[in-house]
Image (cartoon, rainbow, N blue to C red):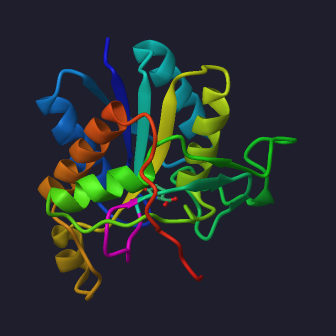
Amino acid sequence: MARVLMTGFAPFGGESVNPSWQAVSLLGARRDDIAAVELPCEFAASLPALRAAFLEHRPSLVVCVGQAGGRQEVTPERVAINLVDARIPDNAGEQPVDVPVVPDGPAAYFTTLPVKACVAAIRSAGVPASVSHTAGTYVCNQVFYGLMHLLTEFPGVRGGFVHVPFSPEQVAASGTAAPSLGVDRIAAALEALADTALATAEDIAVSAGAEH
Ligand code: PCA
């Protein structure tokens, strides 16, 4: 039985790879206690796939990971909101606008990962990281919200979401100047995050406050 379920996403938005899945699959191959599962980048299919993976592996910790192109750091997310507002169609061609993830669900859920301790551990592993206060309004936020909603049925199981930058290969292929982080460094960050979450019952009290 895997102690940790870690998910990454399929490529989307015209990309041919998604570094979230590349890093998660690398880690899953290296660690017996981490089950790696790829989720479709589709509003209709992503949460059923997450629920099936959860019920198959029955982990004590779930970490979902997605690509946030343009970010410079690995960013554990603090809050999931009950809103879908898609900027582009998903991989099934659906583009829902201004609908809830869960009708009549609470407005938001907080992560149950110790995000500040995780950020400190990722930085100690030599990878830039900071806490994020928005997971957006696309499939990643939907999966994060759906995960936290699912975990209300399983007290004691902790979970959260992490966004990661583009890989250098993606940026090189696009010919842009977007920030990037190598897949091996992303995998090292996710490993530090998982180990810290498993070992830390209570988050550390340091500021990650943001003015905007
Ligand atoms: N990133 C998208 C969805 C899939 C992914 O890797 C997002 O941030 O919503």
Q: Is residue 147 visible?
A: yes
Q: Position of residue 206 (x, y in %)?
A: 43, 62
Q: Is residue 77 above or below residue 70?
A: above
Q: Is residue 123 left or right of residue 50?
A: left
Query: Quadrant where the N terminus lies?
Result: top left
Q: Give the camera-side residue of 138 and 189.
A: 189
Q: Which residues are magenta?
A: 68-75
Q: Residue at x 23, y 38 (%)?
A: 25
Q: Is residue 73 magenta?
A: yes
Q: Is residue 141 left or right of residue 184?
A: right
Q: Position of residue 150 (x, y in %)?
A: 63, 29
Residue extending farthest front: 205
Residue extending farthest top: 1
Q: Give the camera-side residue of 139 and 30.
A: 30
Q: Position of residue 12 (x, y in %)?
A: 42, 59
Main SS category, magenta section: loop
